[in-house]
Image: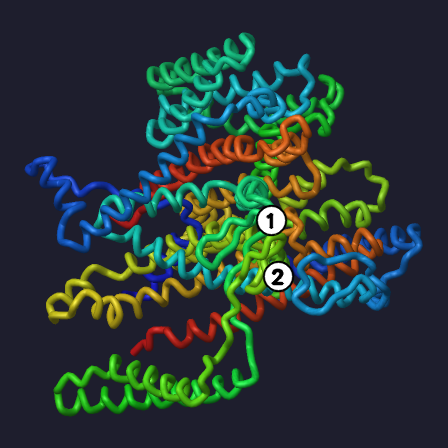
C-alpha cells in the first residue's frame, strides 16, 4: 500500500461519524432460507455467535419496550414547550414558526432540486413534525403550524421538482437563512423588539448556539488553516500555536475562559450576556478543529494545481481563493459535517456553566421536587432528539462522501 | 530603454521585502490586540484588588474532596488540592483508556464479523452511543442508573460485587510483605520464558519440526510460578473480597457513583470511536494481502496476526492517540456529577480564591503536559510499527 493511500485512509477515517451499516449478503438466485443460512448459521462458530447475540438483543429490546410502555411520560409532555423553546415569550412565537416555515420550504425545494441526501433530511423533518403534530399533548395551534410545515416541505418539493431554474435562488436563500432567522429570533436592532437571550432555552438555544458557532468558526478556521501553511514563519507559528493550544484544552475549560476571562480581557463593562460569551468560546474552539480539517484538504491538493495556476499567471491570492480553496473545501465537506455533529453534541456542555439549553432544561426539570427521580424519561427523550439529528447529519455526511469522492475516475 | 533597466523592482513586488513587511504588519496587529487585552486585564485585576501571582497556592484550601487518592484534608493548601485533582484525572483516564480499548477493539471486530446479526448489533451500539452527547450519557448513568439503586444497607450482591446507590464495591488485591519478592521473581520468570520461546523458535526454524514454542514458554512460566507458590505458601497479593455486614460493605475496593458513571460513560463513548478506527484500519489493508495469505496457505488467525494486523496498526495508532487524548480531555466533564478531577477542583479553587487567571493557566499547562506525554508515548509506538521503506 502506498503511503498516499494510507494517508488518505487516515484522513477520511479521522472524523467519520457513522459508516456503512452492515447488510445481509443477498443473492437474487438464492432462496431466503439459504441466504439466512449463509449469513447466520454457517458452521458451529457462527451458530453459537448468532444464538448468543440473539438472546442478548432480545433481552435488551424487551427491556427497552417494557420501559417505554410501563412508564408514564407526563414529565416530558408537561414540559414539552420548556424543553423545545425554553421561556421564549408566547406572543413572539411567530418568529420561531417563521424560521421553521422557511427551513421546511427550503428543505423541500432542495429535495426536489437535488434529490440525494436532502430526501433523508426532508423525510426526517417531516416525520418529526408529524409525530409532534399528532401526539395529544400539543395544542391545536401547534399542530396546525406543524401541519403547515409539512405542507411547505411538500410544496417546496413539488416546486423544486418542476422548476429547475430556481437553483440559484434556493442557494441564495440558504445562505441568508441563518442571518435572517437568527436576526428575527433575537430581534433586529430597532426594527422589531429584541427578545433577550435569557428567554431562549431548550432545543432552540442548542440550535442557536450550534449554528452561530458553525457559521462563526468558518472564516476563522479557514484563515487559521491558510496561516498554518503560510510561508511567513511568524504567521505560521502563531497559527500552529493557537491551533495546538486550543486542541490541547478540554472544551469545558474554553467555556470557563469565555465566561470568566472575556469580561476581564475586554475591560469588565461590556454588558455581554453569558449566551454571547458561550457563542464566542464555541466559535474560537471550533475554529481550531475546523482549521485542522481544512488543512487536511489543502494537503490533498496535488502540486500540479499550484503549478498550473502559476503557469496561467495567477498571483498567490488568486491561486489560493480561486483554485486551491474551492477544491480543498469540497474535499473536506464530510469531515466538516462530522465537526458540526460534534459541535451540536458539545453544545450540551453549556448545561455545566448554567445555561438552560436542551440538556440544561432537562436537568432543571429533574430537580423539580414534583418530578423527583424521573430522570430516565427526561434524559431518554433528550437523547432520542439528539440522536435523530446527529444521525441524520452523519447520514448526510456519509452520502456526501460517497458522491463527492473522485477516486473512481 | 536604459533608464528602464536601471529601475529597481518596486518595493511591493520585492520578494525579500514583502514577506518581512507582511510579518511586521501581522506582529503589529496581533501585538496591539494582545497589548489591549493585557492592559484591560491589569486594570481589571487592579480594580478587584488582586495582583497576579501564584502565592495563593500555599494558603489553606478549606474545602473537602470526596475521592482523594492521595492524603488530603481540608487544612491542606490549594496546591495540594490541585494535585489531588490531577491524580483523579489520571486515575479515571488511565482505567478509561484501558477499558475503552478493550471494548472498542471487541466491538470493531464484531462489526467486521461475517455474522450479520452480530455485526448489526455492533453497528447499532456504535450509532447510539456515538450520536448522543457524552454529558448526557454521564447524567443518565449517574442520575438514572446508579442513584436509584438500593441504599447501602440493602446493597445488591452479584457474586463478589456489591452495588448500591453509593457506588460499587469490587474485589481488589492488597499487597503484603512478600509481594515485592514475588514481583522480582516473576520478572525473572518472564525473562526465562521469553528465552525458552526464542530458543524453541530457533530450533523450529532450523530443524523444521513443530516445537510448540508459545505453549511451552507459557507452560514454563506457569510451572515456575507454581513452584514458588509452594515455597512461599502465599500468592503474590492477598485478594480482599467485599463482605456485606448489615449497614455497610467492608473489604474490597469501593468505587463511588460519580467515578463509576464517568468511567463507564467515557469507556462506552470512546469505545465507539475506537471500534470504527479498528474496523477502518483493518479494512484499509488491501484485499490482495488477504488473498495472498490464502494463496500461501495461512490459517486466518495467523494471517491476521502476521500480515493484516501489522499493516492495520500503522493506520490505527495515530487515530488511537487522538482518541486517548480526547478521553483525557473529556474526563473534565466529571465535574458535572461531582467527581473532583482537575477542572472540578480548579473551579472550586477559582470560586474560593478569586484567582481565575492563575488557575486557568495552571489547568492549561496540566492539559498540555498530558497531551505532550501521550503524544511522545504514542509516537514511540508509531515509530516501532512504522513500515520500513525500501
Q: Which residue is mark 1?
A: B153
Q: Which chain is mark 1 on? A: B
Instruction: Specify whether B149 is left or right of A284.
Output: left
Query: Toward which corner of the image does residue A92 lie, by quadrant?
Result: top right
Residue B109 in the image: state x and y as whole percent: 31, 56
Instruction: Specify whether A116 is left or right of A144.
Output: left
Q: Which residue is mark 2?
A: B89
Q: Are marks 2 and 1 on the same chain?
A: yes
Q: Residue drawn at (62%, 64%), measured in percent from left and top?
A: A237
Q: Earlier in the sequence, mark 2 or mark 1?
A: 2
Name the outermost residue toward the front: B246
Q: Could you tell me which secondary element the residue under label 1 belongs to?
A: helix
Q: Residue drawn at (69%, 57%), measured in percent from left and top?
A: B66
Instruction: Specify whether B385 is left or right of B49.
Output: left
Residue B385 in the image: state x and y as whole percent: 37, 74
Residue B291 in the image: state x and y as whole percent: 15, 63
Q: How is the image coloured?
A: rainbow
Numbered tag placed on residue B388 in the rendering: none
- Quarter placement of the N terminus of chain A: bottom left
Q: Residue drawn at (69%, 18%), measured in percent from left and top?
A: A89
Residue A315's place in the image compared with A138, above or below, is: below
Query: Is the C-beta separation of discs 2 and 1 under 8 Å?
Result: no
Amino acid at each position: 500500500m502506498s503511503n498516499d493511500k494510507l494517508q488518505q485512509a487516515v484522513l477520511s477515517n479521522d472524523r467519520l461519524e457513522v459508516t456503512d451499516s452492515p447488510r445481509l449478503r443477498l443473492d437474487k438466485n438464492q432462496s431466503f432460507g439459504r441466504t439466512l443460512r449463509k449469513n447466520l448459521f454457517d458452521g458451529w462458530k457462527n451458530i453459537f455467535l448468532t444464538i448468543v447475540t440473539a438472546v442478548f438483543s432480545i433481552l435488551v429490546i424487551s427491556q427497552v419496550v417494557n420501559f417505554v410502555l410501563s412508564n408514564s411520560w407526563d414529565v416530558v409532555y408537561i414540559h414539552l414547550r420548556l424543553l423545545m423553546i425554553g421561556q421564549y415569550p408566547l406572543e413572539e412565537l411567530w418568529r420561531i414558526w417563521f424560521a421553521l416555515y422557511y427551513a421546511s420550504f427550503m428543505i423541500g425545494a432542495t429535495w426536489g432540486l437535488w434529490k440525494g441526501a436532502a430526501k433523508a433530511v426532508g423525510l426526517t423533518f417531516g416525520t418529526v413534525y408529524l409525530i409532534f403534530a399528532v401526539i395529544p399533548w400539543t395544542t391545536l395551534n401547534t399542530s396546525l403550524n406543524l401541519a403547515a410545515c409539512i405542507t411547505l416541505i411538500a410544496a417546496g418539493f413539488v416546486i423544486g421538482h418542476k422548476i429547475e431554474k430556481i437553483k440559484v435562488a434556493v442557494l441564495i436563500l440558504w445562505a441568508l437563512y441563518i442571518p435572517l432567522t437568527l436576526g428575527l429570533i433575537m430581534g433586529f436592532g430597532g426594527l422589531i423588539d429584541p427578545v433577550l437571550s435569557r428567554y431562549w432555552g431548550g432545543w432552540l438555544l442548542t440550535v442557536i448556539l450550534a449554528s452561530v458557532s458553525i457559521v462563526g468558526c468558518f472564516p476563522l478556521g479557514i484563515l487559521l488553516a491558510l496561516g498554518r501553511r503560510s510561508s511567513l514563519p511568524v504567521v505560521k507559528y502563531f497559527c500552529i500555536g493557537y491551533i495546538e493550544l486550543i486542541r490541547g484544552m478540554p472544551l469545558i475549560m474554553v467555556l470557563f475562559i469565555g465566561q470568566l476571562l472575556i469580561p476581564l480581557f475586554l475591560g469588565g463593562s461590556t454588558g455581554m450576556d453569558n449566551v454571547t460569551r458561550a457563542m464566542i468560546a464555541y466559535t474560537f474552539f471550533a475554529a481550531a478543529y475546523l482549521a485542522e480539517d481544512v488543512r487536511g484538504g489543502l494537503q490533498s491538493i496535488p502540486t500540479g494545481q499550484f503549478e498550473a495556476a502559476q503557469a496561467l499567471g495567477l498571483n498567490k491570492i488568486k491561486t489560493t481563493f480561486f483554485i486551491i480553496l474551492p477544491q480543498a473545501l469540497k474535499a473536506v465537506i464530510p469531515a466538516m459535517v462530522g465537526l458540526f455533529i460534534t459541535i451540536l453534541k458539545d453544545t450540551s456542555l453549556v448545561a455545566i456553566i448554567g445555561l438552560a439549553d436542551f440538556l440544561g432544561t432537562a436537568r432543571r426539570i429533574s430537580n423539580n421536587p414534583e418530578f423527583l427521580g424521573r430522570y430516565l424519561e427526561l434524559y431518554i427523550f433528550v437523547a432520542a432528539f439528539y440522536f435523530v439529528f446527529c444521525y441524520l447529519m452523519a447520514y448526510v455526511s456519509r452520502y456526501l462522501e460517497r458522491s463527492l469522492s473522485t477516486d473512481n475516475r | 530603454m536604459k533608464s528602464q533597466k536601471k529601475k529597481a523592482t518596486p518595493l511591493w513586488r520585492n520578494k525579500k521585502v514583502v514577506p518581512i513587511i507582511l510579518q511586521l504588519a501581522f506582529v503589529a496587529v496581533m501585538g496591539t490586540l494582545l497589548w489591549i487585552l493585557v492592559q484591560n486585564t491589569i486594570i481589571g485585576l487592579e480594580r478587584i484588588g488582586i495582583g497576579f501571582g501564584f502565592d495563593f497556592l500555599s494558603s489553606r484550601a478549606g474545602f473537602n474532596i470526596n475521592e482523594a487518592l492521595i492524603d488530603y484534608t481540608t487544612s491542606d493548601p490549594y496546591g495540594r488540592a490541585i494535585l489531588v485533582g490531577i491524580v483523579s484525572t489520571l486515575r479515571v483516564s488511565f482505567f478509561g483508556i484501558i477499558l475503552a480499548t478493550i471494548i472498542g477493539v471487541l466491538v470493531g471486530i464484531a462489526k467486521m464479523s461475517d455474522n450479520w446479526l452480530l455485526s448489526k448489533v455492533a453497528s447499532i451500539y456504535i450509532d447510539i452511543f456515538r450520536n448522543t452527547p457524552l454529558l448526557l450519557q454521564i447524567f443518565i448513568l449517574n442520575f438514572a442508573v446508579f442513584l436509584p439503586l438500593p441504599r447501602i444497607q440493602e446493597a445488591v450482591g452479584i457474586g463478589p460485587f456489591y452495588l448500591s446507590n453509593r457506588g460499587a464495591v469490587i474485589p481488589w488485591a492488597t499487597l503484603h510483605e512478600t509481594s515485592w519478592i514475588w514481583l522480582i521473581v516473576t520478572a525473572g520468570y518472564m525473562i526465562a520464558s521469553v528465552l525458552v520461546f526464542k530458543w524453541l523458535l530457533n530450533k523450529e526454524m532450523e530443524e523444521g519440526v513443530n516445537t510448540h514454542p508459545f505453549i511451552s514458554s507459557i507452560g514454563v512460566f506457569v510451572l515456575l510460578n507454581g513452584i514458588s507458590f509452594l515455597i512461599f505458601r502465599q500468592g503474590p497479593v492477598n485478594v480482599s473480597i467485599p463482605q456485606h455486614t448489615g449497614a455497610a460493605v467492608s473489604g474490597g475496593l469501593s468505587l463511588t457513583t460519580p467515578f463509576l458513571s464517568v468511567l463507564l460513560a467515557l469507556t462506552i463513548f470512546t469505545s465507539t470511536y475506537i471500534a470504527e478506527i479498528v474496523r477502518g484500519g483493518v479494512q484499509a489493508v488491501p484485499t490482495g494481502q488477504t488473498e495472498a495469505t490464502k494463496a500461501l496457505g495461512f490459517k486466518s488467525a495467523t494471517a491476521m496476526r502476521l500480515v493484516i494486523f501489522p499493516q492495520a496498526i500503522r493506520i490505527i495508532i495515530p487515530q488511537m492517540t487522538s482518541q486517548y487524548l480526547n478521553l483525557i480531555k473529556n474526563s473534565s466533564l466529571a465535574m458535572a456529577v461531582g467527581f473532583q478531577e482537575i477542572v472540578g477542583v480548579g473551579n472550586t479553587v477559582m470560586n474560593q480564591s478569586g484567582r481565575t487567571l492563575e488557575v486557568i493557566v495552571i489547568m492549561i499547562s496540566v492539559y498540555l503536559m498530558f497531551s505532550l506525554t501521550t503524544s511522545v508515548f504514542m509516537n514511540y509506538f508509531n515509530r516501532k510499527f512504522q513500515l520500513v521503506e525500501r
